Amino acid sequence: MEVITLAFMQRALIAAILTGLVAPAIGTYVVQRRLSLLGDGLGHVAIAGVGLALLTHTSPLPVAVVVCVAGAVGIELLRERGRATGDVALAVLFYGGLASGVLMAGAAGQGAGTLSNYLFGSLTSVTASDLVIVAVLGVVVLIASVGLAPQMFAVCADEDFARVLGLRVRAYNLLIVVLAAITVTTAMRTVGLLLVSALMVIPVATSQNLFKGFRSGLYGAMGIGVVVALSGVFGSFYADVPPGAFIVVLAIAAFAVSWPITSWRHRRRPLASVDEVEPLPHEPTPEHEHVHGPGCGHRVVEHGDHVDYVHDGHRHVAHADHYDEH
Amino acid sequence: MSVIPVVVDDLNVSLGGLPILRDVSFAVEQHEVVALLGGNGSGKTTLVKALLGLVPHQSGEIAIFGTPLAQFHAWSQIGYVPQRASVSLHTTTVRELVTSGTLSTRRPFTRLSRAGKARVSEVIERVGLTKKADDAFVHLSGGQQQRVLIARALVSAPPLLVMDEPFAGVDLATQQRLADLVRSLHDDGMAVLVVLHETEVFEPLLSRAIVLREGRVVKDGVLETHDHGHEAEPPGGTVRIIEEVRPWR
Ligand SMILES: Nc1ncnc2c1ncn2[C@@H]1O[C@H](COP(=O)(O)OP(=O)(O)OP(=O)(O)O)[C@@H](O)[C@H]1O
Ligand SMILES: [Mg+2]
Ligand SMILES: [Zn+2]
Ligand SMILES: [Zn+2]
Ligand SMILES: [Zn+2]
Ligand SMILES: [Zn+2]
């Protein structure tokens, strides 16, 4: 275990913990909004940022963050307009990002080898200044995705209802894609830009198989994310393969294991659950002098297995020595 | 003290360039349960959404509790039951959904108070779903889901409840019970605007019905069966409007 004493491994492990927590956290909202491929597209956009940084000899991470966030805002505005051409516009943006990134990297004299460090992750390339950016941005995304969970959950679950709650739905939707863009970019050293989407989506699906409820699902996904990211980094060190590939394979393995657990849980549920109506709380009338009965002058209304008498706009039914409101 | 919960005046709404609502005017007073009737596509859902600011209107005035819609911010005063549940995450529990109804009064980064949690359990009990409270919403039957949406709308104890076909797919016995629940809340002072196809179970508590046809109000009046409790007529008669009223003009 003396690998832990290596400085580059310490940085890689810290980055892995943060990415493992953050990617599934924001991924929970992305999945809920059925935007699972958004992370993938944003990864492509970030590649343009990396290419631009290589071309201008600046640090890739900050440039990629700015480019990717700008792309995310553009995508959200397009989605909000609900344009029929949205799919085409997204394809242009995503593949334009990938192609221009590769072009700029090539023009900078950097081959596919350099770029692949960003596409699939690379243990040795996490610099100290990268780690500071990853840590700061990671904590921001974590605070937002856990602290604002009730609001973002409501917006993702039912947009119209969230509006009637007075929530600023547009702002939250924008926040979710911006946080996703930050997450995608800061994950580029750990899982890489082409594979990060898998870490946003697969632990969420795994967690949904294992836990009931939105909040347990959120925390479960974060836990699974940390475990596979850390294991992937170690595996990558010993097997000498890009960490991203190892992390994603582990995430898929965890998902495969969670699958039978769900079907086992479902099998234990009673087969057909009959819609048994629980009785609503019992409510006696205040005072009642009149005795209801056939021909008493009050209108009779059928009510399930008995009849009620309509009495001053209320429905009354005899029960023991009094009448109940029905 | 008596601010009118809903006043709509000369409302015109177009969607995709087509006029959907034309010159719609009506009001819902605090002591009223008002039914919004009309065939499929007559514009009932559009009217409800316009009223809540979910679709824009081209002209006309909407005031909620005396405040023009654009300036209205007291959202905890409105409970909304949408026509369809659009809940996507399949692990979401009944309790989590109902809890989201408390957000109109909660600031970001604050926890739900103990009283708030008790209130959530209370409304879940009132719709008879205590045993299902921690089950996934998507595993409930259609009628049970509808009850969850009603509980979610009621959790903030709103003085105005707006429901869009809350009884679609709900069996008659459950409809009765939900109507009973609405009635007891109405007795406590809640105004109700409800889109209906079948008025049957609501009949005893409806004060008025508004009928839309092709986006216009074609009828607005008191129901024949109202205040006629001593007539021994068969239950479930059809609604006929005997008295056309437009009290806000
Ligand atoms: N976003 C939209 N764009 C264009 N037209 C729309 C849109 N939404 C609704 N419409 C049209 O507006 C009309 C009224 O629709 P609405 O949903 O209000 O009817 P409704 O009375 O609620 O019907 P139902 O009883 O089926 O619920 C319909 O003809 C519908 O096609
Ligand atoms: Mg409708
Ligand atoms: Zn009687
Ligand atoms: Zn009585
Ligand atoms: Zn009793
Ligand atoms: Zn009864």
Image (spheres, helix red, strand yellow):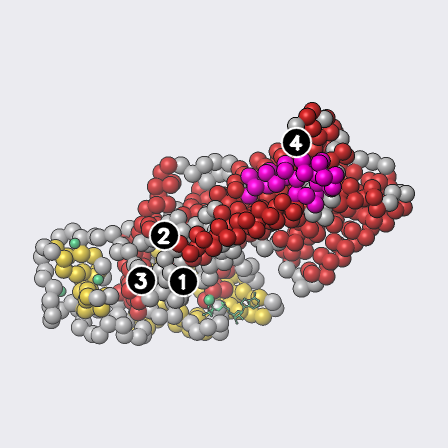
Q: Residues within 10 Å of mark 2 (few under 14, many from 20)?
A: some
Numbered disc 4: what chain? A
Which quadrant is home to the N terminus of chain A?
top right
Write the start and end of the magenta stretch as one range: A221-247
Q: Name the mark nearer the viewer: 4 or 2.
A: 4
| Image marks 2 and 3: residues in contact by CB distance under 8 Å | no
For label 4, the residue is A14
First reached walking from the N terminus: tag 2 or tag 3 = 2
Q: Secondary structure at mark 2?
A: helix
Q: Position of residue B130 (x, y in %)?
A: 33, 50
Position of A71 compared to B3: left or right? right
- Say which mark, if any, is on residue B142: 1
Instruction: Same chain for labels 4 and 2? Say yes or no.
Output: no
Nearest to N terminus: mark 1 or mark 2: 2
Badges 3 and 1, same chain = yes
Residue type for callout 4: Ile
Rounded to the nearest angstrom, the CA distance separating label 4 from label 1 is: 47 Å
C-beta proximity under 8 Å, tags 4 and 3: no
Q: State the separation of the CA atoms marked 4 and 2.
A: 41 Å
